[in-house]
Amino acid sequence: MKTIIAAGLVLLSASAGLADEAPVAEGTLHANLAGPSHVAKQDGEGIYNSVCAACHMPNAKGGTGAGHYPALAANDKLAASAYPVTLVMNGSKGMPSFKGMMSDAQIAAVVTYVRTHFGNGYADPVTLEEVKQVRETQ
Amino acid sequence: MSSQENLPALKRRDLFRMIGAVAGGSAMYQAMTGLGFAADSQYAGPIRLDGSPKGAKVIVLGAGWAGLVSALELRNAGYKVELLEYNNRVGGRAWTIRGGDTIAEMGGETQKCGFDAGLYLNPGPWRIPYHHRAYLDYAKRFGVQLEPFIMINYNAYVHSKDYFGGKPQRFREVQADFQGHVAELLAKTARQDKLDQSVTKEDQEMLLDALKSWGALNKDYAYVAGHDSAERRGYAVNKGGGLMPEPVGGQPISLSDLLKSDVWRALTFGQTHQWQSTIFQPVGGMDATPKAIGKTLADITTLNAKVTAIHQDDRGVTVTYVDARTGKDRREVKGDWCICTLPLPILAQMEVQAGPELLAAASAVAYSPAVKTGLQFKRRFWEEDDHIYGGISFTDQPIRQIAYPNFGYNKPGKGVLLGTFSGGPEGFALASLSAADRVKAAVEQGSKLHPQYKAEFETGVSWSWHRSPFTMGCAAAWTDELRARHYRDLAEINGRLVLAGDHVSELVAWQEGAILSALDAVSRLHRRVIAA
């Protein structure tokens, strides 16, 4: 529970500017603008389809523009779960950090889902303990 | 009146320039503030870059606001400039989607906008506060006509799906009732002498007087249905003439319902400095100003240029690019300096020769999500039936806002409104849908505020900023922690490369931030060139 509360606080500042041109100060966060601060879905598939699919696309094939979103489908970088867990937690190079928006259980669920779908066959589920460790090494 | 304020205007300006030249922009700003100027903007008037650039050439990457301003001002100062842009147009996020436009998101979905002539969606920035002086100055210099953007409309709706039976409340009712209840509570406390500790007896009487007036309380300091409250919240039966029925004041919403439903949150929106009146929009669409500037730079602009690498050494900068439409025709352009305004997610993925601190900063700052959806309706029912002319309705559904067009009021015929403006986790959820489904969601949720939606809807267009090929996100999601760690590294000149854009400002996602960042980058670069 403690982690969830802490994560919520992080997100207040991170999400303050999300819904409009400009970040609003933490103290003036408008629920009517920013909405909830946490991802609602708890299951891996639900999280994928309401967060990840925004960039990696519903079919996990990614996309290309001036930069690119890597395909998660048949991606051998998912073999070691630490890599996707760290990316979801911290973000990098365009990938946002979701540590404030998702609990450890949600991160475990969504990484497990991606590693076992879209042509990825990494059957070992991501454990809560593993995600917790990545969060704590921040 | 201080003696400084009596200085002739020209002399003051010279003084600022002198301070600016000697001590840099921040000292000048402090000096100006001290003299009572520049109280809420750091724009100090048109930039002056004195001294010869000695034939130096600058490559400017990205023709959004920061790139356009950089290219414009550097060329005016005598630099050779080349401007590369990924899109087939200038303006970046300052963009307008109109009927006939075909737009393509990453992932391959394309939409052909079916709006009627004269109707449009600004998918990116859509308003300019009065204190964004740099924007206003460029708009004036380039002859762009502005019109008011209505931020707060007292007759627009505030909607909570779980309260008031799902029926939207008028902003004026929520505003008047919240203020009235708070005034009544405080008046009650004051009259019970419970404020003795913090308010003197003399002040207490004045406070009571103020609360009565501010909160529209009756003679007994109560906020109740009747003339006083109705003058603020509006009447249930409006005032008429002749033998028409007498006006009747409506029943205020209870304080408890206002608190539980969260609708009060809409009230502080227009009180936030960036959204305080007066606010403007360019007539005809947000792309007007960048287009006007871009026209004067056409001879030095290369469109459809996808930058793939930035290399630099002691002697200069080499930028490699390909044709954005084909991925072919690799070309190199060489210069002495480079101003890079590319969004960080794109820069971070590119081959860039720069210090590790700059690369780390670019990698660390991701962009926030945002979805906007424009809907065209057969008639302007929000005006005809609901008497809402411009402004914004708020809802706690994922679409979050319905923003009505701020032009063409009271005319018969069609209209386009903004049917979604969503961010945060809900923004991600909407952004995960196809554009067609985002339009459907906007119609479905919007119909909870306006039941006319379903019968009157014609066509829609939606833009998800995370699927935007030229930005990969809405705007830099800085946190205090990220700023403390990376901001300076991002802003400092790194070898022959300097970054500019709203992401290198305190006004993220505002056009003003991009302009101020560009002016600052150009000034610092120029000082270095002159000193060399």
Image: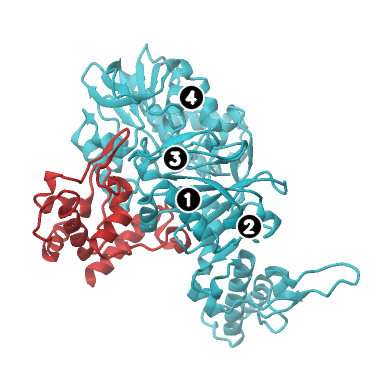
Chain colours: A red, B cyan
Q: Foreground mark, 4 or 1?
A: 1
Task: Respond whether the residues carrying marks 4 and 2 are from the same subunit.
Answer: yes
From mark 4 to mark 2, how far is it between C-alphas? Answer: 41 Å
Could you classify mark 1 by the number of other residues whose Cα lies within 10 Å: few (under 14), some (14-19), or many (20 or more)?
Answer: many
From mark 2 to mark 3, how far is it between C-alphas? Answer: 27 Å
User: Residue A58: x and y, percent?
Assistant: 29, 49
Residue that label 3 marks: B513
Q: Which mark is residue B153?
A: 2
Q: Are marks 2 and 3 in contact (CB under 8 Å)?
A: no
At 47% across and 53% down in the image, what residue appears? B440
Q: Is residue A103 left or right of residue B463?
A: left
Residue sticking out furthest to the bottom: B192
Q: Which mark is residue B439?
A: 1
Residue type at mark 1 is: Val
Residue sticking out furthest to the top: B55
From mark 4 to mark 3, how far is it between C-alphas? Answer: 19 Å
Quadrant (top left/top right/bottom left/bottom right) for the C terminus of chain B:
top left
Q: Earlier in the sequence, mark 2 or mark 1?
A: 2
Residue that label 4 marks: B48
Could you classify mark 3 by the number of other residues whose Cα lies within 10 Å: few (under 14), some (14-19), or many (20 or more)?
Answer: many
For mark 2, give the secondary structure: loop
Q: Are marks 4 and 1 in contact (CB under 8 Å)?
A: no
Q: Earlier in the sequence, mark 2 or mark 3?
A: 2
